[in-house]
Amino acid sequence: MSFRPITTISKPKPVIEGAGVSLDRVFGFTEPEKFDPFLLLDDFRNDDPECYKSGFPWHPHRGIETITYVLEGTVEHKDSLGNSGLLSGGDVQWMTAGSGIMHQEMPQGNKNGQMHGFQLWANLPSEKKMTTPRYQDINLSNIPVIEDDDGSKIKVIVGNYRGILGPVDGIAAEPEFLDISIPPHTHKVIKIDTYKKTFAYIFDGKADFKYASAPAGIKVEKEFEGRELNIRDLSGNKTLIYFDPGEFVSLHTGEEGVRFLLVSGKPIREPIAWHGPIVMNSRNELMQAMHDLNTGQFIK
């Protein structure tokens, strides 16, 4: 049994994107090899509509997949192929841009003006860069939730977790995308594919991911009873934790619980030529994409 050691712990950086949307960039545009097959993760949350209402007007995508997960408020989306829809709290959209689309996303807050969601970019391998675009729009009601005896809840959005299949399928990187909530004073061990690139992003509460063993007095799954250690500093809201390979992610909570995304995927290990929302394998391919965009040939 091998527990995943932590490589890095970091905080997101505030950025302005779209037509003036304030958000937190968890990672992106640096160290693409480290997060391969993932390219970028943005946490867009705000209680002030002035900070997000301008949205993300028409922009291109090619060679990637974008995963939008909405927790609060709504996101209206449209594209140049005639597709449109509305994502509400708990809904997910997995968009395979493939050969190219023009797209826009316009967020709106809930009745209290609150907006919160995530967008994750995943790379496509060379043989699928120019595939036909497609959408998978997943309603909250279609996302399975595992409820454990310790009070933990695990939403399986993508992948196969303990035999429960998420509703998103046919993704090149064979990802697993989980939304996990764990109550206070609980030790949890989560099995992950040993060699997939894996990260956790805490967006509510606190937890300690540093150790395999649980402190005395913490509720522990039977398989891991009898282990003791001292509680160290807990990682809290807006914290990215990146792991080295291993079979299990281990954590425990203190006085408050925790909610986090746990995401893993199979590395593509191909060259990356990247310009904004267009990601290809070579500079020539990237220049061709820009030529297509400037001459009206982007949509295939």
Image (cartoon, rainbow, N blue to C red):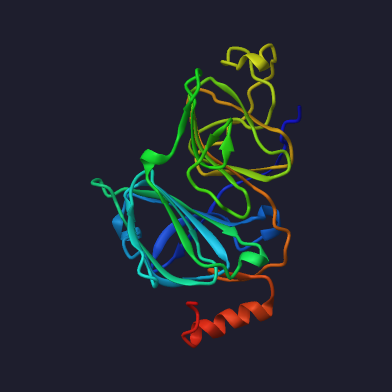
Work out whether residue 80 or residue 118 is closer to the camera in this orientation and state it: 80
Q: Using the rendered image of the protein, determine whether residue 31 is visible from the camera's viewpoint.
A: no
> Vertically, is 183 above or below 204?
above
Q: Position of residue 250 (x, y in %)?
A: 65, 29
Residue at the image point whose x is 50% and y is 41% from the top: 166
Is residue 185 visible in the rendered image? The answer is yes
Residue 220 position (above or below residue 298): above
Q: Is residue 215 above or below residue 197?
A: above
* Count of marks, rendered view: 0
Q: Position of residue 278 (x, y in %)?
A: 56, 71
Q: Residue furthest bottom?
A: 295
Residue 66 percent coordinates (x, y)? 50, 58
Residue, x 37% and y 45% (percent of image)? 139
Give the quarter of the image for residue 57.
bottom left
Q: Residue at x 53, y 49 (%)?
A: 169
User: Which image quadrant: the N terminus?
Assistant: top right
Query: Toward which corner of the image does residue 143 lie, by quadrant?
Result: top left
Residue at left 39%, top 48%?
116
Question: In the displayed structure, does residue 48 sit left or right of residue 171?
Answer: left
Q: Residue furthest right?
A: 1
Pick the front one: 219 or 13: 219
**Depth check, front residue: 139 or 252:** 139
Q: Nearer the viewer, residue 174 or 53?
A: 174
Location of residue 244 in the rendering, given as x and y in whole percent from the top left corner: 73, 42
